[in-house]
């Protein structure tokens, strides 16, 4: 039972960190998305062929983000699940052991989630204004934050084989 509830405990802890501590680390009113990064990390480094587990993790992370952020319930859950399906489809082509891969996957994941929000949540500023004021800064900041964050998660959760 404890082993099955461990991912939920991790997600609750990260959601708490994101909604409290990361509010103080905002740059131009943008903060990195730890729930997104955690979902991407565990999807990339999962060795099993089981596709259900990353989808449940993504759905749970997205619902937690919806609840903690006050967005439309299901908007983050939907975007996270679709994103994980895309990552799963291209996972064999992603070299998940390199820092640049972490940066690029995080950047494009953040872009995807941002575009998903832009097209499904209204009213937002015009596209060009949103792109330069919200979407790109969020994606760049999240991608920059992903490199040390993935390194930390890897040190904590990945068992090295010798």
Image (cartoon, rainbow, N blue to C red):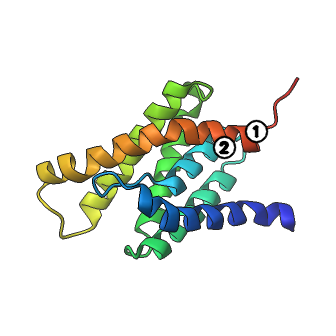
User: What mark, if any, has residue 78 been given in the picture?
Assistant: none
Give x and y (percent) for residue 155. 72, 38
Give x and y (percent) for residue 4. 80, 63
Q: How many marks?
A: 2
Regarding residue 41, the answer to whether it shows in the image is: yes
Is 11 located above or below residue 150 in the figure?
Answer: below
Q: Nearer the viewer, residue 31 or 61?
A: 31
Mark 1 lies on a secondary structure that is: loop
Is 20 located above or below residue 114 in the figure?
Answer: below
| First along the sequence among labels 2 and 1 | 2
Q: Nearer the viewer, residue 103 or 113?
A: 103
Q: On the rendered image, what quadrant is the C terminus found in?
A: top right
Query: Residue 60 falls in which quadrant of the image?
Result: bottom right
The crowd level at tag 2 (other Cα within 10 Å; few <14, some 14-19, many 20+) is some
Residue at 81 percent across and 36 percent down: it is 159
User: Which residue was labeled with disc 2?
Assistant: 153
Answer left or right for 154 relative to 65. Answer: right
Residue at 40 percent across and 67 percent down: it is 75
Residue at 46 percent across and 33 percent down: it is 103
Regarding residue 62, the answer to whether it shows in the image is: no
Give x and y (percent) for residue 97. 63, 26
Mark 2 lies on a secondary structure that is: helix
Give x and y (percent) for residue 127. 14, 53
Q: Are marks 2 and 1 in contact (CB under 8 Å)?
A: yes
Answer left or right for 79 relative to 50. Answer: left
Residue at 87 percent across and 68 percent down: it is 1
Answer left or right for 27 relative to 18. Answer: left
Label 2, label 1: how far apart the Cα atoms are:
8 Å
Answer left or right for 26 relative to 36. Answer: left
The crowd level at tag 1 (other Cα within 10 Å; few <14, some 14-19, many 20+) is few
User: Which residue was labeled with disc 1?
Assistant: 158
């Amino acid at each position: 039972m404890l082993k099955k509830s461990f991912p939920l405990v991790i997600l609750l802890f990260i959601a708490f960190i994101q909604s409290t501590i990361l509010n103080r680390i905002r740059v131009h009113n943008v903060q990195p998305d730890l729930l997104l990064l955690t979902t991407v990390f565990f999807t990339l480094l999962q060795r099993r062929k089981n596709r259900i587990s990353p989808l449940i993790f993504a759905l749970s992370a997205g619902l937690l983000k919806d609840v903690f952020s006050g967005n439309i319930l299901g908007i983050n859950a939907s975007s996270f699940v679709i994103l994980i399906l895309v990552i799963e489809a291209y996972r064999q082509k992603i070299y998940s052991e390199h820092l640049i891969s972490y940066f690029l996957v995080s950047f494009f994941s953040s872009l995807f989630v941002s575009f998903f929000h832009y097209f499904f949540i209204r009213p937002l500023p015009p596209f060009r204004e949103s792109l330069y004021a919200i979407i790109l800064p969020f994606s760049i900041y999240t991608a920059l934050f992903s490199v040390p964050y993935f390194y930390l998660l890897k040190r904590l959760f990945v068992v090295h084989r010798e």
